[in-house]
Amino acid sequence: MITLKKKFEDIDSFVINKKVILRVDLNLPSYEGEIVDFTRLEKITPTIKYLLKRQAKIILISHMGRPNQNDKESLSLKLLSSKISAYINSEIVFIEDNIMNIKKEKIEKAFNKCNVVLLENLRFFEQEASNDDIFSKKLSSFADIYINESFSTCHRKHSSIVGIPKFLPSFPGMLLEKEVLNLKKLITNANYNSAVAVFGGSKVSTKIKVIEYYLKKFDKILIGGAMANTFLYSKDINIGSSICEKSMKKTAKSLLDYYGDKIVLPNDFVTIDKYKKNQLRSINDIKKDEKIFDIGPQTRMKYFNFIEECSCLLWNGPLGFYEQKPFDEGTNYVIKAVKNNNNKNFFSVAGGGDTISMLNHAKASDYFSFISTGGGAFLEFIQGNGLPGLDSLNN
């Protein structure tokens, strides 16, 4: 288990008037070219404002998407410059040059106009993913201090995550520190009388290790979303034409055989047929041409009761096609259960994948003790695994 040796507050003594290279995550969820969720930008705003109050000069670096030669224009961080400026209430200069060609004088000239500079999408440069030392050193040359405020990319061995700390004094950001403290609490606290994990989303294969980890630690694992289809399929239950990872049949079956009723599966469903009509189906009544889009009312109440009474909750992934009514009811019932939980020491954590967008869509973020901004990093950390980005800060 990683423990941060440094704290964000440690920068106070020497950050004033210093140049800070701040690694953030501006990889904001989008739909048809429009950004639909600004949570990650909202979460880093306090850190930027904190540094500005201390007269720091900030160089923001981030990635966005997985660019290729055809979509660089749509993934340029230039598109976010005005939005960032509005959030932090400060002017920004965007430098679109190839990072390897930027001279220090250009950075200094920008800082004569304002206190925040934004560089181009890091993934436009292949040296970022290859953790190229020359690229890392170039980025480091612009600043006096490095701060990592991108927990969500701490599982990557990229230049901006593990390379720069080799060349600059390095510290965790305010948000990254909160991520580590809260997620450590989730996996190390032994005072939970009843702990429940909810796993949704589409793939068992990407979450099998974390499911196994919490089967050993928690009392109940509630399964929903398309992931549940794979478990049902492993029991030879007809799931119609629903999404399913058939290659994971043996793995899912072995978990069910070994852990028994510790794994809780849906027993009724809301489906959609070939005529696009919604149907309510019990576990043995799904038709061949139907697709499961949400858990049914009996399952909702069953899951509601488990969550309403637990002392600790971990939630990763939606239980249905939450973006479209009425297939958001399963997800909404979990949210209601969290809201209704009156356990004095109730501790709830949500994160990973579409979880943030799901909770924002339901306007439910305030009901949770902590919501992680991480995807893959979140899933790695909550299994007790180390993260390269955190290791590099400690080293």
Image (cartoon, helix red, strand yellow):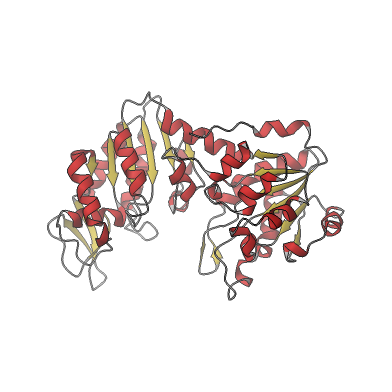
**Image position, residue 105 (x, y; %):** 86, 57
Q: Is residue 303 visible?
A: yes
**Image position, residue 116 (x, y; %):** 76, 51
* Left or right of 265 on screen, residue 61: right
Q: How many marks?
A: 0
Task: Decide: is 292 above or below 264.
Answer: below
**Image position, residue 246 (x, y; %):** 24, 61
* Left or right of 381 on screen, residue 227: left
Is 126 or 181 nearer to us in this picture? 126
Q: Please identify the residue farthest to the left as the structure is shown.
A: 284
Q: Please identify the residue farthest to the bottom as the structure is shown.
A: 70
Q: Is residue 375 visible?
A: no
Is 204 or 227 nearer to us in this picture? 204
Q: Quadrant of residue 5?
A: top right
**Image position, residue 70 (x, y; %):** 58, 76
* Left or right of 79 on screen, residue 195: left
Task: Decide: is 363 above or below 129.
Answer: above
Residue at 58% over, 36% down? 177
Is 180 or 48 nearer to us in this picture? 180
